[in-house]
Amino acid sequence: MHPDRYKWIALSNATLAVLLATLDGSITIIAMPDIFRGIHLDPLVPANSSYLLWMILSYLVVTSVLIVSLGRLGDMVGRVKIYNLGFVIYTVASLLLAVDWMTGRSGAIYLIGFRVLQGIGGACLLANAAAIITDAFPARQRGMALGINNIVGVSGTFIGLVLGGVLAPIDWRLVFLISVPVGIFGTVWAYLGLREVSTPRRAPIDWAGNVTFALGLILIMVAVTYGIRPAGGHPIGWASPRVLGLLGGAIACLVAFMLVERSSANPMFRLALFRIRAFTFGTLSTFLSSVARGGLMFMLIIWLQGIWLPQHGYAFTDTPLWAGIYMLPLTIGLLIAGPTSGYLSDRFGARPFSTAGMVLTAVGFVLLMLLPTDFSYAAFAAVLLLIGVSMGLFASPNRAAVMNSLPREHRGVGGAMNQTFQNSAQVLSIGIFFTLMIIGLASTLPATMSAGLQAHGVDAATAHQVATLPPVSILFAAFLGYNPIQHLLGPHALAGLSAHDQSALTGSTFFPTLISGPFQDGLHAAFLFAIVACLIAAAASLLRGGRAIDDGEASETPRGAESRAQVAAGT
């Protein structure tokens, strides 16, 4: 097959794979109310909150933990082999998810288990897709190719929100079933169309490194799930013995991992790659931008589903779909800017585009902070478009610069290391942004809620009891598009109220109006954190140095070239 034809086959197939893998990380978020209704489990009951979190996080945690190992394995036995296996695992898991016949907690455990299997397939795809594209394209076109691939992947996160909102009300199983025919098509196409361009270099598997890294990352992720839940009478659990123990265990595992990797002859995690300046600063930028992007998605969902859409006449059951639709300007901006900036970075280098992209993203967060909670949609859409364009301006050149800087034989593991930081940041962003929101709600919500309930006839004791419930329950309600007043008060308390007060409390405006003030306090804290993350990412992009391409078509500096030579030699 002619190389010019093969490179487009590699790009199109890998882009389909990345779209599937990233789309599935978000499609369940919007579909969550319908999924829980389908398995007859109330996600707002405190005992069920762990099922809600792990339904969202299990896929992201597994991909974060396994990507580096599978990228390293691709370097050893063949990237296309591991990639093709990923398509098979992903498709089978999607089919099994769609046939869950159980209900209640057993139904939730079944879904979480096969989300883990689906995450293994997604990790195989994400770990090797960028390396397959980099192998297929000459350096002068990689920015454009990786730009298309990366932006479609990032956009998949937001496309999943719309798709989940459309399919879940029809039947929650469709959010999993839709991946099956696409996965079968991609699997057959990959087996027939892709070939091994790289030269596999067999080596012993670094079991000690794999185990210590996986344990450390898993312990951090589990700590996040407990950290945002109440503990010991506090609205968050970060200071609880359980979370401190998990974090201590994670630190011990990661320290052991670093020691193992420094002494291993065949390390899983190529620490020597961090000697390459463009790789190090590009990966730091990837991590920080992903933290900001992940937090943005969750904050916008809560803002739209819990407050703005109900205030503008949308029923709570309809808010998941419309939240995805109203966030489309963000996706449009990404799709416009991503391939264009990737193409331009091939000619002018990544640094000016990635740096400007992060600065403009920070400006977008500032503009979001200036909007009132009950905003004009035209202004909101314009800010989302700006943020989408800015993120697209950053993502494609940054990804291309990272992959271009890697020696050919380490592209699988290097690309997977970069992807690990990106995926881990999405999980950490949930912990960071939910924590900031919970702190903001806990400071002002109890008094606001107690006064609002008493104004509509609820007795003081019941109003106080409801108002002092954990703010995370309120946050989950807004996140899922529920009206939590019926859950919080219960049928007995509502039955004692007048018809007018019942209608007011359970209507579409009471809850959004009640939490809009406290929510804005938490929102500003979260966006301020995102602004700082974007500005540090911009500084890291600025410090990446000049162009660094391993193929000999261009070079960075003598020092950069020397570093890449040392890495290739294994020193």
Image: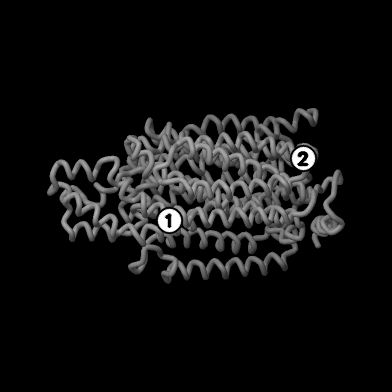
When the figure is inspected, residue 560 is found, relative to residue 184, above or below; the finding is below
Q: Secondary structure at mark 2?
A: helix
When the figure is inspected, residue 313 is found, relative to residue 207, above or below; the finding is above
Q: List the residue tagged with mark 2.
A: 346
Q: On the picture, is 488 further left or further right than 536? A: left
Q: List the residue tagged with mark 1.
A: 522
Q: Nearer the viewer, residue 8 or 111?
A: 8
Residue shown at 56% from the left, 68% from the top: 251
Is the residue marked by circle 1 packed among few (<14), some (14-19), or many (20+) residues within 10 Å? Answer: many
- Residue 421, picture quadrant: bottom right
Q: On the picture, is 103 further left or further right than 256? A: left
Can residue 173 be seen here? The reply is: no
- Residue 568, picture quadrant: bottom right
Residue 151: percent from left, percent from top:
62, 39
Q: How is the image coloured?
A: one colour
Residue 341: percent from left, percent from top:
69, 39
Residue shown at 56% from the left, 31% from the top: 184
Q: Amino acid at mark 2?
A: Asp
Q: Amino acid at mark 1?
A: Gly
Task: From the image, state whether disc 2 or disc 1 is nearer to you.
Answer: 1
